[in-house]
Image: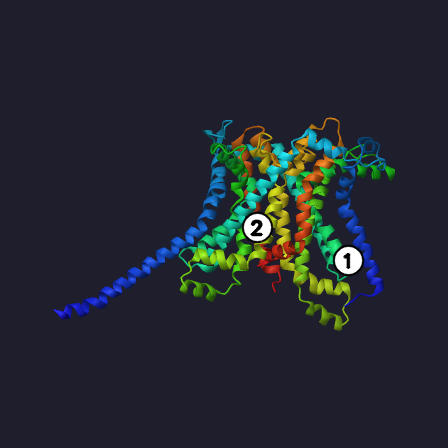
């Protein structure tokens, strides 16, 4: 059904104005990252566009190292979450045993404990394990995930139980059934959850700030903070170049997976 | 000799059967635990233990390494509630929730309603609206740090262009919390929009068709179909936005560091400063306990209210 012309004009006007406002800070940062510092400081329109800010950002800061760290940590967290969530979801859907319901409530209860409120003992745990400034220290605490378990549980429920019974009769064990049947069937949900996990891990701030003290494992988010606080000359072009580098991977991921992500998040949120 | 045998056999096989059933039960329990154990171990180490430990620490004084030194009972809590700095922090946190939550929801709902129309090129607008979800707190804060810059920032250019005095967005106690709230609302738009759009799209089109036949207008349909049908999604989004607002940290760290005059010293930043700058882990834990209780109460209220008011399909 198509709208009348008058309504269409109203909608498009509102769409364009709101989109311009929402997108303005990002576009501004993008343009500034190619501007000379003189243009930025005088508030004029860009007179020249250059890559100087990017060259400077990479030369003055170990940005490549930060990027590598962020990629590694985000991918490890993503894989950890996928494995643990899918194993747990499998147990909640297909296996029957004493205490299962109680454990399910335990998983729900975890969603009420904010990570921020338990950050002090976690910091001490990581320190006592000797995990400060290490990749495990930055990733392992985030592997277990109630939201991911619920999302996959919803999805696994759609797989007929008879399928499992049939596989068990043919001598296939639970683990093999999980690997060869359940995971492939649920791959869209796994991709959605993976994208979400990568996104949130890449954007983590408080924990990497606490758990890193040097450049070797520091993530790009904390690198950006360093860039911003250490830029003595207020070189906004360089700072914005750094910020653009930080957001490019997640923006690409979001643009590619927006539809999937929206569907997956809504499902996980409401059922 | 054959008699006892014939009697004993069924008993034995019954015992066998019981035994077998028990063995099966243990086996299936072990298997279930095997699948769940990785999650349970990590939840225990990084969630439940820290929770208990935080409560424990809140009754002690600690040394710089975080080891308990003196048991002080409720003294950390008593001192905390008598401290003007902590009370300021609580006040700012609640104000911040009040500033950010309703506006985030209203703006996102407006955007989601616009983006739910079937128009050509709507995908581009959906992508733009959801884009802030891909922007990290550090990057978003840096963008707005520039926008709020007193002399070269874009916002003050507009303000002075309109003939007003420059605003010290991040240095004036009356404006700083508002500035942080603006940044936060912008950051949260993408996620909230995406969830609400998903909720709108799952409403059955049939409902609108029958309303159209009755000649219902746009706002009539919005009030009587869209909002009631969207209520479970709205309920979820409100809960998540409130909880997120209580956990705000990154924006504060980059934009204001809790200043000016502690007006933006929100509770998580306050915990961070007390624990990792002042090394007062006991009193920091007491604050963390308060944060935990607030979030627990919020969740319970939401569940109770949600149960009654929410229309489930």
Q: CA distance from mark 1 to mark 2?
A: 39 Å
- At 32% across and 61% down in the image, what residue appears? B21
B152 versus B187 height, above or below: above
**Do badges 1 and 2 share one subunit?**
yes
| Circle 1 crowding by C-alpha within 10 Å: few under 14, some 14–19, many from 20 | few
Going from N to C along the chain, the mark reached first, 1 or 2, is 1
Instruction: Indicate left or right for A89 with B123 as reference.
Output: left
Q: Which residue is mark 1?
A: B121
Farthest residue in the bottom direction? B213
The image quadrant that residue B111 belongs to is bottom right
Point out the frontmost of discs 1 and 2. 1
- At 40% across and 61% down in the image, what residue appears? A171
Q: Which residue is mark 2?
A: B299
- From the top left corner, tell me how far across and down residue A133 is, in percent: 54, 32
Q: Quadrant of the C terminus of chain B?
A: bottom right
| Circle 2 crowding by C-alpha within 10 Å: few under 14, some 14–19, many from 20 | some
A223 versus A2 height, above or below: above
- From the top left corner, tell me how far across and down residue A165 is, in percent: 43, 65
The image quadrant that residue A100 belongs to is bottom left
Is residue B265 visible to us here?
no
- At 54% across and 60% down in the image, what residue appears? A185
């Amino acid at each position: 059904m198509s709208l009348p012309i008058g309504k269409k004009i109203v909608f498009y006007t509102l769409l364009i104005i709101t989109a311009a406002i929402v997108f303005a800070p990002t576009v501004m940062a993008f343009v500034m990252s190619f501007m000379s510092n003189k243009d930025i400081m005088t508030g004029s329109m860009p007179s020249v566009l250059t890559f100087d800010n990017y060259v400077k950002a990479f030369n003055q800061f170990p940005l490549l190292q930060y990027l590598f760290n962020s990629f590694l940590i985000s991918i490890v967290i993503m894989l950890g979450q996928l494995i643990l969530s899918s194993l747990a979801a499998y147990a909640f859907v297909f296996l029957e045993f004493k205490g299962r319901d109680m454990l399910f409530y335990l998983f729900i209860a975890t969603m009420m404990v904010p990570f921020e409120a338990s950050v002090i003992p976690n910091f001490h745990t990581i320190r006592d394990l000797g995990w400060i400034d290490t990749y495990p220290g930055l990733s392992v605490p985030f592997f277990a995930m109630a939201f991911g378990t619920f999302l996959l549980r919803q999805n696994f429920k759609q797989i007929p139980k008879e399928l499992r019974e049939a596989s068990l009769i043919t001598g296939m064990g639970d683990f093999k059934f999980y690997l060869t049947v359940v995971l492939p069937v649920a791959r869209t949900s796994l991709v959605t959850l993976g994208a979400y996990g990568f996104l949130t891990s890449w954007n983590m701030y408080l924990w990497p700030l606490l758990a890193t003290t040097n450049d070797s494992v520091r993530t790009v988010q904390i690198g950006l903070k360093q860039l911003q606080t250490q830029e003595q000359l207020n070189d906004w072009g360089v700072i914005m170049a750094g910020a653009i580098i930080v957001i490019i991977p997640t923006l690409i991921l979001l643009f590619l997976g927006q539809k999937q992500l929206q569907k997956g998040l809504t499902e996980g949120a409401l059922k | 000799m054959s008699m006892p045998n014939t009697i004993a056999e069924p008993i034995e096989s019954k015992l066998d059967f019981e035994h077998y059933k028990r063995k099966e039960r243990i086996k299936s329990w072990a298997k279930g635990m095997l699948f769940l154990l990785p999650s349970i171990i990590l939840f225990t180490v990084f969630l439940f233990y820290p929770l208990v430990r935080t409560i424990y620490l809140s009754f002690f004084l600690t040394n710089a390494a975080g080891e308990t030194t003196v048991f002080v009972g409720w003294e950390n809590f008593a001192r905390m509630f008598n401290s003007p700095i902590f009370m300021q922090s609580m006040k700012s946190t609640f104000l911040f929730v009040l500033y950010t939550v309703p506006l985030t929801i209203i703006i996102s709902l407006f955007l989601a309603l616009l983006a739910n129309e079937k128009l050509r090129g709507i995908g581009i607008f959906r992508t733009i609206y959801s884009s802030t979800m891909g922007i990290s707190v550090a990057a978003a804060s840096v963008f707005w740090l520039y926008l709020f810059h007193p002399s070269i920032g874009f916002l003050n250019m507009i303000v002075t262009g309109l003939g007003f005095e420059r605003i010290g967005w991040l240095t004036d106690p009356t404006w700083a919390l508002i500035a942080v709230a603006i940044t936060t609302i912008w950051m949260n738009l993408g996620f909230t929009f995406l969830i609400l759009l998903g909720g709108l799209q799952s409403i059955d089109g049939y409902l609108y068709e029958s309303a159209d036949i009755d000649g219902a207008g746009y706002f009539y349909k919005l009030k009587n179909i869209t909002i009631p049908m969207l209520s479970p999604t709205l309920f979820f989004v409100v809960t998540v936005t409130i909880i997120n607002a209580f956990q705000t940290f990154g924006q504060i760290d980059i934009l204001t560091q809790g200043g000016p005059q502690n007006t933006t010293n929100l509770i998580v930043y306050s915990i961070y400063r007390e624990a990792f700058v002042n090394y007062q882990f006991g009193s920091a834990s007491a604050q963390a306990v308060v944060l935990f209780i607030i979030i627990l109460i919020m969740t319970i209220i939401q569940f109770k209210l949600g149960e009654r008011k929410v229309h489930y399909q």
